[in-house]
Image: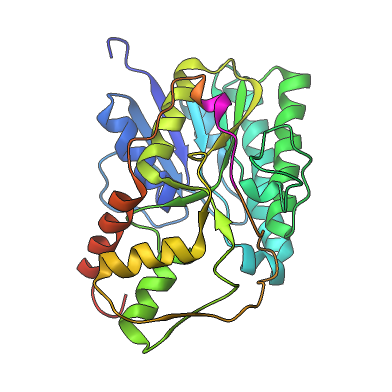
Protein backbone atom coordinates (compact mmCIF):
# COMPACT_ATOMS: atom_id res chain seq x y z
CA UNK A 1 0.00 0.00 0.00
CA UNK A 2 1.73 3.15 -1.19
CA UNK A 3 -0.31 5.72 0.72
CA UNK A 4 -0.86 4.15 4.11
CA UNK A 5 -4.53 4.41 4.97
CA UNK A 6 -5.71 4.71 8.54
CA UNK A 7 -8.41 2.61 10.15
CA UNK A 8 -9.83 2.61 13.67
CA UNK A 9 -11.51 -0.52 14.97
CA UNK A 10 -13.96 -0.07 17.83
CA UNK A 11 -14.16 -3.08 20.11
CA UNK A 12 -10.61 -4.00 19.14
CA UNK A 13 -10.11 -6.45 22.00
CA UNK A 14 -13.24 -8.48 21.26
CA UNK A 15 -13.53 -11.61 19.14
CA UNK A 16 -14.26 -9.91 15.82
CA UNK A 17 -12.33 -6.71 16.57
CA UNK A 18 -9.09 -8.45 17.52
CA UNK A 19 -9.10 -10.45 14.29
CA UNK A 20 -9.77 -7.27 12.29
CA UNK A 21 -6.79 -5.57 13.94
CA UNK A 22 -4.46 -8.40 12.91
CA UNK A 23 -5.96 -8.67 9.43
CA UNK A 24 -5.71 -5.01 8.45
CA UNK A 25 -2.30 -4.62 10.07
CA UNK A 26 -1.10 -7.50 7.87
CA UNK A 27 -2.46 -5.67 4.81
CA UNK A 28 -0.39 -2.58 5.61
CA UNK A 29 -3.03 -0.28 7.08
CA UNK A 30 -2.19 2.02 9.96
CA UNK A 31 -4.47 0.53 12.62
CA UNK A 32 -5.79 2.06 15.82
CA UNK A 33 -8.31 0.52 18.18
CA UNK A 34 -10.29 1.12 21.31
CA UNK A 35 -12.06 -0.98 23.89
CA UNK A 36 -13.02 -1.14 27.56
CA UNK A 37 -9.96 -3.05 28.77
CA UNK A 38 -7.20 -1.35 30.70
CA UNK A 39 -4.20 -0.30 28.68
CA UNK A 40 -1.27 -2.68 28.41
CA UNK A 41 1.37 -3.42 25.80
CA UNK A 42 -0.16 -3.87 22.37
CA UNK A 43 1.16 -3.88 18.85
CA UNK A 44 -1.12 -1.05 17.73
CA UNK A 45 -2.32 2.35 18.93
CA UNK A 46 -4.91 1.70 21.61
CA UNK A 47 -7.44 3.92 23.38
CA UNK A 48 -9.28 2.79 26.48
CA UNK A 49 -12.86 4.04 26.65
CA UNK A 50 -15.22 4.02 29.63
CA UNK A 51 -18.50 2.14 29.47
CA UNK A 52 -20.81 4.88 30.75
CA UNK A 53 -19.19 7.87 29.02
CA UNK A 54 -17.04 6.72 26.10
CA UNK A 55 -14.61 9.34 24.87
CA UNK A 56 -15.57 9.23 21.18
CA UNK A 57 -15.26 13.00 20.71
CA UNK A 58 -11.68 12.99 21.96
CA UNK A 59 -10.72 10.01 19.81
CA UNK A 60 -12.11 11.41 16.56
CA UNK A 61 -10.92 14.97 17.18
CA UNK A 62 -7.33 13.96 17.99
CA UNK A 63 -6.73 12.10 14.71
CA UNK A 64 -8.31 11.65 11.30
CA UNK A 65 -9.19 8.18 10.02
CA UNK A 66 -10.00 6.95 6.54
CA UNK A 67 -12.18 4.13 7.89
CA UNK A 68 -13.93 3.19 11.12
CA UNK A 69 -15.26 -0.33 11.75
CA UNK A 70 -17.64 -0.58 14.68
CA UNK A 71 -17.16 -4.04 16.16
CA UNK A 72 -18.04 -2.83 19.66
CA UNK A 73 -21.19 -3.47 21.67
CA UNK A 74 -22.80 -6.49 23.26
CA UNK A 75 -23.33 -9.68 21.24
CA UNK A 76 -25.19 -11.80 23.76
CA UNK A 77 -28.84 -12.57 22.92
CA UNK A 78 -29.76 -14.26 26.25
CA UNK A 79 -28.17 -11.38 28.18
CA UNK A 80 -30.23 -8.88 26.18
CA UNK A 81 -33.41 -10.71 27.22
CA UNK A 82 -32.69 -10.03 30.90
CA UNK A 83 -30.79 -6.72 30.53
CA UNK A 84 -32.48 -4.84 27.66
CA UNK A 85 -31.44 -1.37 28.84
CA UNK A 86 -27.75 -2.26 29.02
CA UNK A 87 -28.00 -3.87 25.60
CA UNK A 88 -29.67 -0.75 24.19
CA UNK A 89 -26.91 1.46 25.52
CA UNK A 90 -24.19 -0.79 24.07
CA UNK A 91 -25.73 -1.50 20.67
CA UNK A 92 -27.88 1.54 19.87
CA UNK A 93 -26.98 4.58 21.94
CA UNK A 94 -23.25 4.08 21.40
CA UNK A 95 -23.77 3.88 17.63
CA UNK A 96 -25.42 7.30 17.78
CA UNK A 97 -22.57 8.71 19.87
CA UNK A 98 -19.96 7.34 17.46
CA UNK A 99 -21.67 8.70 14.35
CA UNK A 100 -22.14 12.09 15.99
CA UNK A 101 -18.42 12.22 16.82
CA UNK A 102 -17.58 11.33 13.22
CA UNK A 103 -20.01 14.00 11.94
CA UNK A 104 -18.42 16.68 14.10
CA UNK A 105 -14.74 15.83 13.92
CA UNK A 106 -14.01 13.38 11.08
CA UNK A 107 -16.79 13.68 8.46
CA UNK A 108 -14.64 12.19 5.68
CA UNK A 109 -14.23 8.93 7.60
CA UNK A 110 -16.03 5.97 5.98
CA UNK A 111 -17.97 4.08 8.62
CA UNK A 112 -18.71 0.32 8.58
CA UNK A 113 -21.37 -0.69 11.07
CA UNK A 114 -21.47 -4.30 12.24
CA UNK A 115 -25.12 -5.09 12.81
CA UNK A 116 -26.48 -8.65 12.97
CA UNK A 117 -28.60 -11.19 11.12
CA UNK A 118 -30.68 -11.18 14.33
CA UNK A 119 -32.62 -8.29 12.78
CA UNK A 120 -34.33 -10.83 10.47
CA UNK A 121 -35.82 -13.08 13.17
CA UNK A 122 -37.58 -16.01 11.51
CA UNK A 123 -37.71 -15.10 7.80
CA UNK A 124 -40.68 -15.91 5.60
CA UNK A 125 -38.43 -17.68 3.08
CA UNK A 126 -34.84 -18.73 2.45
CA UNK A 127 -32.34 -17.59 1.37
CA UNK A 128 -32.69 -14.30 3.23
CA UNK A 129 -32.14 -11.22 1.10
CA UNK A 130 -31.10 -7.90 2.58
CA UNK A 131 -34.50 -6.49 1.56
CA UNK A 132 -36.38 -9.06 3.68
CA UNK A 133 -38.76 -7.65 6.29
CA UNK A 134 -36.99 -7.38 9.63
CA UNK A 135 -38.75 -8.95 12.58
CA UNK A 136 -36.32 -9.42 15.48
CA UNK A 137 -36.97 -11.98 18.23
CA UNK A 138 -34.85 -10.41 20.98
CA UNK A 139 -33.93 -7.02 22.42
CA UNK A 140 -30.50 -7.55 20.86
CA UNK A 141 -32.07 -7.89 17.39
CA UNK A 142 -34.34 -4.86 17.91
CA UNK A 143 -31.45 -2.73 19.14
CA UNK A 144 -29.29 -3.71 16.17
CA UNK A 145 -32.18 -2.75 13.87
CA UNK A 146 -32.49 0.60 15.62
CA UNK A 147 -28.76 1.20 15.16
CA UNK A 148 -29.21 0.59 11.41
CA UNK A 149 -31.90 3.27 11.34
CA UNK A 150 -29.50 5.68 13.03
CA UNK A 151 -26.91 4.86 10.37
CA UNK A 152 -29.40 5.68 7.63
CA UNK A 153 -30.25 8.95 9.42
CA UNK A 154 -26.61 10.01 9.40
CA UNK A 155 -26.23 9.04 5.75
CA UNK A 156 -29.43 10.73 4.55
CA UNK A 157 -29.18 13.92 6.60
CA UNK A 158 -25.45 14.40 7.18
CA UNK A 159 -24.00 12.53 4.15
CA UNK A 160 -21.76 10.31 6.27
CA UNK A 161 -20.37 7.60 3.98
CA UNK A 162 -21.27 4.28 5.55
CA UNK A 163 -22.09 0.61 5.03
CA UNK A 164 -23.96 -1.87 7.22
CA UNK A 165 -22.92 -5.51 7.66
CA UNK A 166 -25.23 -8.23 8.96
CA UNK A 167 -23.05 -11.18 10.04
CA UNK A 168 -24.76 -14.53 10.44
CA UNK A 169 -23.08 -17.20 12.61
CA UNK A 170 -19.45 -16.15 12.93
CA UNK A 171 -17.04 -18.65 14.46
CA UNK A 172 -13.30 -19.15 14.84
CA UNK A 173 -10.40 -19.14 17.27
CA UNK A 174 -10.98 -16.81 20.20
CA UNK A 175 -14.76 -17.19 20.35
CA UNK A 176 -15.71 -18.23 23.88
CA UNK A 177 -19.48 -18.46 23.59
CA UNK A 178 -22.17 -19.91 21.33
CA UNK A 179 -22.45 -23.38 19.81
CA UNK A 180 -18.85 -24.54 19.27
CA UNK A 181 -17.59 -23.25 22.62
CA UNK A 182 -20.57 -24.77 24.41
CA UNK A 183 -20.05 -28.11 22.68
CA UNK A 184 -16.33 -28.27 23.42
CA UNK A 185 -16.85 -27.52 27.11
CA UNK A 186 -19.59 -30.14 27.42
CA UNK A 187 -17.58 -32.77 25.56
CA UNK A 188 -14.73 -32.21 28.01
CA UNK A 189 -16.88 -32.12 31.15
CA UNK A 190 -20.11 -34.08 30.64
CA UNK A 191 -20.90 -37.72 29.95
CA UNK A 192 -23.75 -36.77 27.63
CA UNK A 193 -23.76 -33.56 25.66
CA UNK A 194 -27.05 -31.68 26.00
CA UNK A 195 -28.21 -28.97 23.58
CA UNK A 196 -31.35 -26.92 23.07
CA UNK A 197 -33.70 -27.63 20.16
CA UNK A 198 -34.17 -30.63 17.93
CA UNK A 199 -30.92 -30.48 16.00
CA UNK A 200 -32.79 -29.57 12.82
CA UNK A 201 -32.41 -25.86 13.43
CA UNK A 202 -30.04 -24.36 10.88
CA UNK A 203 -27.49 -21.59 10.65
CA UNK A 204 -25.29 -20.03 7.99
CA UNK A 205 -21.76 -20.18 9.38
CA UNK A 206 -18.90 -17.90 8.35
CA UNK A 207 -15.34 -18.22 9.61
CA UNK A 208 -13.80 -15.13 11.16
CA UNK A 209 -11.08 -15.02 8.49
CA UNK A 210 -13.78 -14.87 5.82
CA UNK A 211 -15.62 -12.12 7.71
CA UNK A 212 -12.40 -10.10 7.69
CA UNK A 213 -12.27 -10.55 3.92
CA UNK A 214 -15.89 -9.36 3.70
CA UNK A 215 -14.79 -6.15 5.41
CA UNK A 216 -11.92 -5.71 2.98
CA UNK A 217 -14.25 -6.19 -0.01
CA UNK A 218 -16.61 -3.55 1.38
CA UNK A 219 -13.81 -1.08 2.04
CA UNK A 220 -12.46 -1.47 -1.48
CA UNK A 221 -15.65 -1.77 -3.51
CA UNK A 222 -18.75 -0.54 -1.65
CA UNK A 223 -20.42 2.71 -2.67
CA UNK A 224 -20.85 3.56 1.04
CA UNK A 225 -24.37 4.82 0.44
CA UNK A 226 -25.85 3.10 3.50
CA UNK A 227 -25.61 -0.22 1.65
CA UNK A 228 -26.53 -3.34 3.66
CA UNK A 229 -24.60 -6.60 3.22
CA UNK A 230 -25.24 -10.10 4.51
CA UNK A 231 -22.01 -11.66 5.78
CA UNK A 232 -22.34 -15.43 5.45
CA UNK A 233 -21.53 -18.23 3.02
CA UNK A 234 -24.96 -18.98 1.61
CA UNK A 235 -25.05 -22.49 3.10
CA UNK A 236 -27.74 -23.84 5.44
CA UNK A 237 -26.09 -26.10 8.02
CA UNK A 238 -28.13 -27.88 10.68
CA UNK A 239 -27.02 -27.67 14.30
CA UNK A 240 -26.92 -31.48 14.36
CA UNK A 241 -24.52 -31.58 11.39
CA UNK A 242 -22.28 -28.92 12.93
CA UNK A 243 -22.28 -30.78 16.27
CA UNK A 244 -21.33 -34.05 14.59
CA UNK A 245 -18.51 -32.34 12.69
CA UNK A 246 -17.14 -31.04 15.97
CA UNK A 247 -17.46 -34.44 17.70
CA UNK A 248 -15.48 -36.03 14.89
CA UNK A 249 -12.81 -33.34 14.96
CA UNK A 250 -12.60 -33.63 18.75
CA UNK A 251 -12.23 -37.43 18.55
CA UNK A 252 -15.13 -37.94 20.94
CA UNK A 253 -17.59 -40.86 20.98
CA UNK A 254 -20.04 -39.07 23.29
CA UNK A 255 -23.67 -38.75 22.27
CA UNK A 256 -25.54 -35.49 21.82
CA UNK A 257 -28.98 -35.15 23.37
CA UNK A 258 -31.31 -32.46 22.01
CA UNK A 259 -33.94 -31.44 24.57
CA UNK A 260 -36.52 -30.29 22.01
CA UNK A 261 -36.91 -26.87 23.69
CA UNK A 262 -36.64 -23.73 21.60
CA UNK A 263 -34.50 -21.10 23.33
CA UNK A 264 -36.23 -17.72 23.54
CA UNK A 265 -34.76 -15.24 21.08
CA UNK A 266 -33.25 -17.82 18.74
CA UNK A 267 -34.40 -18.15 15.11
CA UNK A 268 -35.21 -21.58 13.67
CA UNK A 269 -33.68 -21.63 10.18
CA UNK A 270 -31.21 -19.34 8.46
CA UNK A 271 -29.53 -19.22 5.07
CA UNK A 272 -28.33 -15.96 3.59
CA UNK A 273 -28.44 -14.66 0.07
CA UNK A 274 -24.86 -13.47 -0.41
CA UNK A 275 -25.05 -12.27 -4.01
CA UNK A 276 -24.56 -8.66 -2.91
CA UNK A 277 -21.26 -9.29 -1.12
CA UNK A 278 -20.16 -11.64 -3.91
CA UNK A 279 -20.63 -8.76 -6.35
CA UNK A 280 -17.90 -6.93 -4.40
CA UNK A 281 -15.46 -9.81 -4.89
CA UNK A 282 -16.16 -12.00 -1.86
CA UNK A 283 -15.46 -15.73 -2.01
CA UNK A 284 -15.12 -18.02 1.00
CA UNK A 285 -11.64 -19.34 1.76
CA UNK A 286 -12.22 -21.49 4.88
CA UNK A 287 -14.22 -24.70 4.58
CA UNK A 288 -16.50 -25.70 7.44
CA UNK A 289 -14.47 -28.83 8.12
CA UNK A 290 -11.18 -26.93 8.27
CA UNK A 291 -12.67 -24.19 10.43
CA UNK A 292 -14.13 -26.64 12.95
CA UNK A 293 -10.91 -28.66 13.13
CA UNK A 294 -8.93 -25.48 13.73
CA UNK A 295 -11.35 -24.44 16.48
CA UNK A 296 -11.02 -27.79 18.26
CA UNK A 297 -7.22 -27.43 18.23
CA UNK A 298 -7.59 -23.93 19.65
CA UNK A 299 -9.89 -25.16 22.44
CA UNK A 300 -7.59 -28.04 23.37
CA UNK A 301 -4.67 -25.62 23.64
CA UNK A 302 -6.42 -23.64 26.40
CA UNK A 303 -5.94 -24.32 30.13
CA UNK A 304 -8.47 -26.90 31.41
CA UNK A 305 -10.46 -24.38 33.45
CA UNK A 306 -10.85 -21.75 30.71
Q: Reply yes or no: does residue 212 show up in magenta.
A: no
Residue at the (59%, 72%) spot, across then down: 198
Apparent side of residue 286 relative to residue 101 in the rendered image (left or right) = left
Residue at the (45%, 31%) spot, across then down: 214
Classify 232 as above or below 37.
above
Classify 301 as above or below 194.
above
Classify 41 as above or below 284.
below
Apparent side of residue 171 relative to residue 247 in the rendered image (left or right) = right
Say which of 155 and 140 sits in front.
Answer: 140
Residue at the (41%, 72%) spot, across then down: 183
Apparent side of residue 213 relative to residue 125 in the rendered image (left or right) = left
Residue 64 visible: no
Q: Residue furthest top?
A: 2
Say which of 142 and 96 sits in front.
Answer: 142
Position in image of residue 35 (x %, y %): 46, 49
Position in image of residue 299 (x %, y %): 28, 66
Quarter of the image for residue 134 reads: top right
Say which of 253 and 292 sits in front.
Answer: 253
Residue 225 visible: yes
Quarter of the image for residue 1 reads: top left
Magenta part of the chain = 271-277
Q: How is the image coloured?
A: rainbow
Q: Residue furthest bottom?
A: 191
Residue at the (35%, 72%) spot, across then down: 184
Say which of 201 and 111 sits in front.
Answer: 201
Position in image of residue 75 (x %, y %): 56, 56
Q: Quadrant of the C terminus?
A: bottom left
Position in image of residue 242 (x %, y %): 43, 61
Number of callouts: 0
Amino acid sequence: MTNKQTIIILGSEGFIGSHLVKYFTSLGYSVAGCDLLEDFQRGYQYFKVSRLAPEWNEIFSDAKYDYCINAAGSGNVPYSMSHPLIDFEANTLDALRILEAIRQFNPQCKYIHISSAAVYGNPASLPIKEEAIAHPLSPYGWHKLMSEQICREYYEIYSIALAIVRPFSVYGNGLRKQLLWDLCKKIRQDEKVGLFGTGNESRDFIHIADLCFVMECIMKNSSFKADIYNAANGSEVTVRHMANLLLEAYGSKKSIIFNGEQRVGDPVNWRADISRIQSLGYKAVTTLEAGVSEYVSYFKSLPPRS
